[in-house]
Image (cartoon, helix red, strand yellow):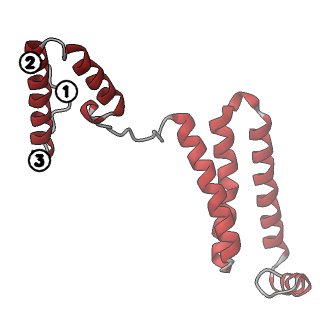
Amino acid sequence: MRVGISRHSLYHHAQRHIGPELRQALASKILKRKGELQEMVAEESGGIVETLRALRGPLWRRFVVVAGMGDERAMCLLAARIHENLQLAAKITGELQPHTTTSVTNILLSPDFQRFRAQLLRAVLKHPAAYRDVMMTFHEAGEEVAAQIDGHASTVIDAR
C-alpha cells in the first residue's frame, strides 16, 4: 500500500474500468520497454554511456508515474538514481569537469622561508656590509608584500 490503496482494490478497479484493449496496449508497451532495455544492456558494443542512457529512460518514466501518484518517497529515490546516472554519464563524456581554483601562497610568510631567512642572516652576520644589504632586501620585500595586501594587488609573481 504505497498510496493507501490495497492491491486487491487496485486489481478490481482495473478489472471494472480498464478495457481489454487498453490493458493489452499497456502490457505490450511495458514488455516493449523491458525488451529494449534488456537488449541495450546486453549489447556490450553500446558502451557505458549508451547503457546509462538506456537505464535512464525507464527511470524517467517511473519518475513521471510516481510524481503523478504523489508518492514523494519514490520520487526522491528515483530522482537520486537519475542524478547518479546523469552525473556518471557527464563525467564519462567530459561534460562535468571539476572547477579549478587559484591558490596564492606568500612564501615570505611560510615557516620554511622564515627558517631559511634566519639561517641566512646568521651566516652573513659575520660580514656587516652583507648583513646590512640582506636585511635591506628582506625589508623591501616585506614592504612590497604589505603594499600588495593593503592594495589587494593581483600580482602573483613579480620577476625582476
What amino acid is at disc 2? Asp
Q: Can you say which quadrant of the picture contains the C terminus?
A: top left
Residue named by callout 1: 157
Residue named by callout 2: 133
SS at mark 2 in the image: helix
Residue depicted at x 8% and y 18%: 133
Could you tell me residue 26's position as x and y percent?
78, 66
What amino acid is at disc 1? Ile
Q: Residues under labels 3 and 1: Cα distance? A: 17 Å
Q: Residues within 10 Å of mark 3 (few under 14, many from 20)?
A: few
What amino acid is at disc 3? Asp
Residue depicted at x 76% and y 40%: 41
Could you tell me residue 24's position as x and y percent?
83, 66
Residue named by callout 3: 150
In the rendered image of this protein, does residue 33 appear above or below residue 123? below
Could you tell me residue 64's position as x and y percent?
63, 68
Tag nearer the camera, 2 or 3: 2
Say whether disc 2 or disc 3 marks the residue closer to the N-terminus: 2
Would residue 153 be visible to someone looking at this image?
Answer: no
Q: Residues under labels 2 and 3: Cα distance? A: 26 Å
Tag nearer the camera, 1 or 2: 2
Say whether disc 3 or disc 1 marks the residue closer to the N-terminus: 3
Would residue 30 be visible to someone looking at this image?
Answer: yes
Q: Nearer the viewer, residue 98 or 80?
A: 98
Quarter of image, res 117? top left
Could you tell me residue 122's position as x and y percent?
25, 19
Say whether disc 1 or disc 2 marks the residue closer to the N-terminus: 2
Q: Residues under labels 1 and 2: Cα distance? A: 23 Å
Q: Can you say which quadrant of the picture contains the N terminus?
A: bottom right
> Left or right: 75 with respect to 92?
right
